[in-house]
Amino acid sequence: MGSEKQPSVVVIGGGTGMPVLLRGLKNLPIDLTALVTVADDGGSTGRLRDEMSIPAPGDIRNVIAALSDAEPMLLELFQHRFTVGNSLSGHSMGNLLLAAMTSVTGNFFTGIQEISRVLNVKGNIYPISNESMSLHAEMADGTIVSGESNIPLANKKVERVYLRPQPVQPLPDAVNAIQHADLIVVAPGSLYTSILPNMIIPQIDVALSNTKANVVYVCNVMTQAGETTGYTAADHVQAIRRHIGEACIDSVVVHNEPISKHVRQVYAEENATPVIYDTDRLLEMGLQIIEGDIIDPSRTTLRHDTQKIAKLLYSLIDKE
């Protein structure tokens, strides 16, 4: 009995937005691949990265947890963060396991594959690169800020971000996944520190611009202080295009319901406001706009609704 080939969906990103998308997509009849940023340098991730010269494991850990079908207790152990005031303080168990498996196998990607097998992960997880790298930003005033975690703290307008040391080599599997995808989803997240570090890597940028797949950007619902203050939806897309080229985003998904007053007040304390969806400008940029009520209303922190966004994205796949 020959089985029909499932459509290939690639999700690219990092941070908190990506696992939300993946939890919904993993149960759909698709061939799912996650391409994950490794430029993080904060907390446990940063310490392990510096001490062991490995790519940042934190975002990878969260994606493994999102795609895993392991027992809840095992996942709780994997995500456990030590709080006792000793040398383990601040480290998460999953980050330590990824570091240990990298040491055992001699390769970060192989370590991810082994842990994915143990935790019964659905889909493929590829670090965007197998190398340790650091993110730098050139600000509008010409100053340079080094380190992913320092960029938002500078509280200056970001002109562009870039990676060092150069040349950064992409994981070949990541490039191949983009080239053969039926749908590519750019997950919501920190624009300059979670999304763009993936997209600016050599060969990845070219593959995104040349792919025949529909590249869909799930736009952030709120601005982020220090990164996207005052940004509209079109500003987010324009920043991506400025780094990668005009052909890299085809469609944009936006939330089309008002944000509650209480939630807006919570975010106002962080100098964050709802992203304005400037429809006319998005259309002028040649983008397909996909609107939907895609927020989980039960949460005080704004998160996309796992099932709603998965259903919407699945509807975009050409299943012919």
Image: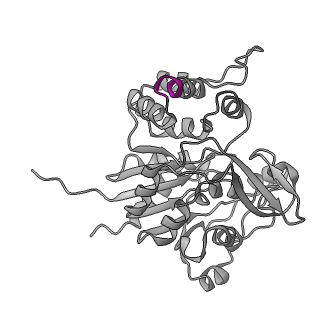
Residue 105 part of the magenta-drawn span: yes
Query: 70 or 56: nearer the eye?
Result: 56
Q: Please provide percent x and percent y for residue 103.
A: 53, 24
Say which residue appears at 49% left-offset and 28% top-offset: 106
Query: 44 or 308: nearer the eye?
Result: 44
Say which residue appears at 55% left-offset and 35% top-offset: 61
Magenta stretch: dominant secondary structure: helix
Quarter location, residue 259: bottom right
Which range of residues does the magenta coloring cover? 101-106
Q: Please provide percent x and percent y for residue 44.
A: 69, 29
- 266 w.r.t. 93: above or below: below
Q: Report the number of numbered marks.
A: 0
Asked if residue 268 lies left or right of residue 298, the reply is right
Q: How is the image coloured?
A: one colour
Residue 116 part of the magenta-drawn span: no
Query: 187 or 263: nearer the eye?
Result: 187
- Quadrant where the image shows the C terminus: bottom left
Asked if residue 73 lies left or right of residue 8, the reply is right
Quarter location, residue 140: bottom right
- 46 w.r.t. 4: above or below: above
Asked if residue 209 lies left or right of residue 231, the reply is left
- 105 w.r.t. 25: above or below: above
Q: Please provide percent x and percent y for residue 28.
A: 36, 51
Q: Please provide percent x and percent y for residue 4.
A: 20, 57
Say which residue appears at 68% left-offset and 42% top-offset: 40
